[in-house]
Amino acid sequence: MYLKQADLFRGIKMDFLKKVMEVTLRESHPEGTRLFRSGDPADYFYILINGRIALSMGGDEKQVHIGSQTGESFGWAALVGRAQYTATARCLRRCDLLKINVSAFIQLLDRYRDDGFIFYQNFSAALGKRLMQSYLKRIERDDRR
């Protein structure tokens, strides 16, 4: 079960994970596939099983993150109250991933409040880690100038 490898689901009970799998699709996409575009409805979030994805933002599609770790998550917009994705996600290599229906997932979080609390603790740690990575990349770019 790949959800157990995802940092977002660390420490969460197996019965909750089984329910999450019921609202999850496993998909494979070839290199070059655009999974979603900035402005698309944010109906899903994703867990990378294997492959490599690029997240980009802005009119010039400036790359802001590369994901390649098993269990890494992306497409979180709806989990933080956004109706639309704020970035574009594209497969840099063939990708296998889990695609989780956000509205069904949020209903599960509401029903399984203890697991929901743990999930959002893990989620905030993942957001903080991604923010720090972004900040460090910016410092490196500025130092090279």
Image (cartoon, rainbow, N blue to C red):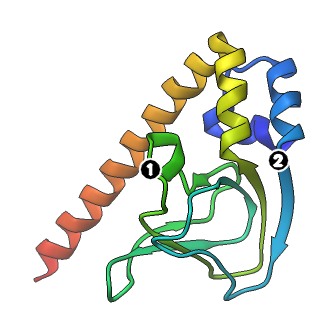
- What residue is pinned by disc 1? 82
Please tell me which residue lies in front, 117 or 68: 117
**Which x, y percent locates residue 127?**
42, 43
Q: Which secondary structure lies at badge 2?
A: strand
Considering only vertical position in the picture, is 57 above or below 76?
Answer: below
Q: Picture coordinates of residue 11 (x, y %)?
A: 68, 20
Q: Secondary structure at mark 1?
A: loop
Q: Is there CB contact under 8 Å for labels 2 and 1?
A: no
Report the Cα–Cα distance between label 2 and label 1.
Answer: 20 Å
From the viewer's perspective, is residue 31 above or below residue 42?
below
| In this picture, residue 24 sits left or right of residue 74 | right
Location of residue 80 (image quadrant): top left
Pinpoint residue 119: horizontal percent, then vertical percent: 59, 26
Q: Residues within 10 Å of mark 1 (few under 14, many from 20)?
A: few
**Would residue 21 be found to the left or right of residue 52 on screen?**
right
The residue at the point 86 percent across, 39 percent down is: 21
- Which numbered disc flags the more N-terminal residue, 2 or 1? 2
| Residue at 73 percent of width and 26 percent of height | 108
* Mark 2 neighbour density, 10 Å: few (under 14) some (14–19) many (20 or more): many
Position of the N terminus by quadrant: top right
Amino acid under label 1?
Arg
- Residue 24's label in the rendered image is 2
In the picture, measured across the screen, residue 18 lies left or right of residue 98, that is right
Q: Residue at x 77, y 35 (%)?
A: 4
The one of 55 and 52 positioned closer to us in this rendering: 55
Could you tell me which residue is drawn at 61 percent across and 35 percent down?
8
What amino acid does circle 2 point to? Thr
Q: Nearer the viewer, residue 93 or 46?
A: 46
> Which image quadrant: the C terminus?
bottom left
